[in-house]
Amino acid sequence: MRTQDIEYRADGARLVGQYVVDDTKPGRRAGVLVCHEGPGLTEHTKKIAARLAALGYAAFAMDYHGDGKPLDDAEERMRRISGWIADATGIRARALAALDVLKAQKEVDPARLAAIGYCFGGTTSLEIARSGADVKAVVGFHSGLATARPQDAKNIKGKVLVCIGAEDPIIPPEQRAAFESEMKAAGIDWRLQLYGGAGHSFTNPAADARGMKGFFFHEATDRRSWNAMIELFNETLK
């Protein structure tokens, strides 16, 4: 397994993501862009990329905060994310630059790309799709579903899956309903899977330590949502 840090620039920022690929397997393969949770690019996200590489994909864990590190300043982090929610231009630029990095790797088949993300990274993967990028599959795990540009859903080229905890305090039923209306209006092949007993950050074992109400790891939902993603990949990336 080869792991490589790759620097790229977008939206005035120096960004450093991590590319993971199994060099023992010949030929080009599908590429998966992995968009990290709100705090930034962590070992948890890098492990997800490595897990995908072990399954035969080429994976690039993007960085949308900068320098390939988590952003520890919570106030600054929320300021950035709130700004990107209000106007997706900046986050789309950073994410599409990362997608270009993935496409440029010699092991990657640029006709077979997917974007997945967690928390605001899931929101980011959806904005990649709304931008019209040629991705065959888009997956959001406990991802914010709201967008300032719902009309851009008509640009989505691939299939969409979002996996949401029914107890998630920051993705209320009204947001899910608005997302449903957005997808229906655009005629997208989409699915929303709602998991009982799960809250926000259900894929991250470190979530419980944050001590935030409604944020907790949920092993069964983590496993089931991963399997739902693999099912979608089998439909779209083979």
Image (spheres, grey):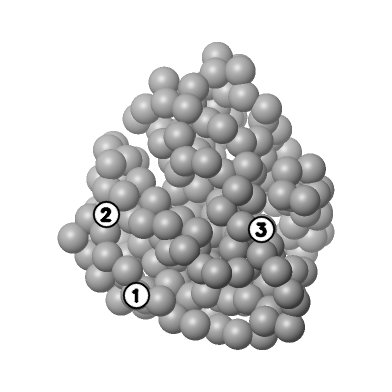
**Does label 3 or label 2 sit earlier along the sequence?**
3
Q: Residues within 10 Å of mark 2 (few under 14, many from 20)?
A: some
The residues bearing labels 3 and 2 have C-alpha atoms spaced at a distance of 31 Å
The residues bearing labels 2 and 1 have C-alpha atoms spaced at a distance of 21 Å
Secondary structure at badge 2 equals helix
Q: Residue furthest left?
A: 12
| Residue 30's disc number | 3
Name the kind of residue labelled 3 in the image. Answer: Ala
Q: Residue at x 45, y 48 (%)?
A: 124
- Picture quadrant where residue 101 is located: bottom left
Q: Residue at x 64, y 44 (%)?
A: 137
The residues bearing labels 1 and 3 have C-alpha atoms spaced at a distance of 21 Å
Q: Residue at x 52, y 31 (%)?
A: 156
**Does label 1 or label 3 sit earlier along the sequence?**
1
Q: Residues within 10 Å of mark 3 (few under 14, many from 20)?
A: many
Q: Is residue 180 above or below residue 162?
A: above
Q: Is residue 209 visible?
A: no
| Residue 80's disc number | 2
| Residue 7's disc number | 1
In this rendering, the label closer to the viewer, 3 or 2: 3
Name the kind of residue labelled 2 in the image. Answer: Arg
